Image (tube, rainbow, N blue to C red):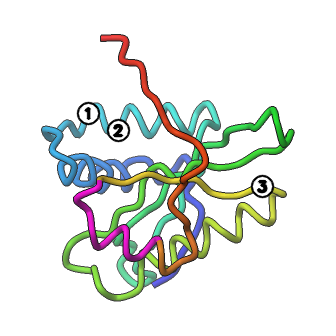
Amino acid sequence: MKIRQANYKDVSKISPVFDEYRQFYGQPTNLTGANKFIQDRMEHAESIIFLAEDPDTGEILGFTQLYPVFSSISMQRSYILNDLFVKSKFRKKGIAKQLIAEAKTFTKTNSGKGLELSTSTHNKEARALYAKEGFEQETEFLTYFWKSV
């Protein structure tokens, strides 16, 4: 298995895995929408996607997607680790850990302040992994969200 940064040619390979990720979080399947969403991110350089790929078959085993953000206070770039997903049959093999490591390396290499992420309070396995990988639960700031619809 190898970890590499995705490029525009990978859109059709990422889309079904991205759709599976969305279904994991209770969304209905929408392969056309998933494809368009990933294609738009690539076309506008709005995210960085790392793939875990089987080097022999080219199968995508999992991915993580980072979004750049900026802090006015620190005047630095950070990244939101918005998506992390490994196909169910490949879990418990260290793939998520390797994807996180690649995201950390990318952040350091690009002088990022750090990585931010959020996950469901019910996703105990992910929460345990994030804690093990050095992520700390934010206690200084509260997060609020306004829904437009």
In the rendered image, which residue does mark 2 sit on? 35
Q: Residues within 10 Å of mark 1 (few under 14, many from 20)?
A: few
In the rendered image, which residue does mark 3 sit on? 112
Say what amino acid the circle numbered 3 marks: Gly
Q: Is residue 5 left or right of residue 82?
A: right
Q: Quadrant of residue 37?
A: top left
Q: Residues within 10 Å of mark 2 (few under 14, many from 20)?
A: some
Q: Is residue 60 visible?
A: no
| Gap in angstroms between the C-alphas marked 2 and 1 | 5 Å
Position of residue 110 measured from the top left corner of the image (x, y, whole percent)? 81, 57
Say what amino acid the circle numbered 2 marks: Asn
Under circle 1, the secondary element is: helix
User: Disc 2, disc 1: CB below 8 Å?
Assistant: yes
Q: Earlier in the sequence, mark 1 or mark 3?
A: 1
Compared to 142, does 125 lie above or below? below
In front: label 1 or label 3:
3
Compared to 134, does 80 lie above or below? above
Q: Residues within 10 Å of mark 3 (few under 14, many from 20)?
A: some
Q: Quadrant of residue 136?
A: bottom right
* Quadrant, the N terminus: bottom left
Please state the extent of the stretch shown in magenta in the rendering: 121-130
Say the numbered circle drawn on residue 32: 1
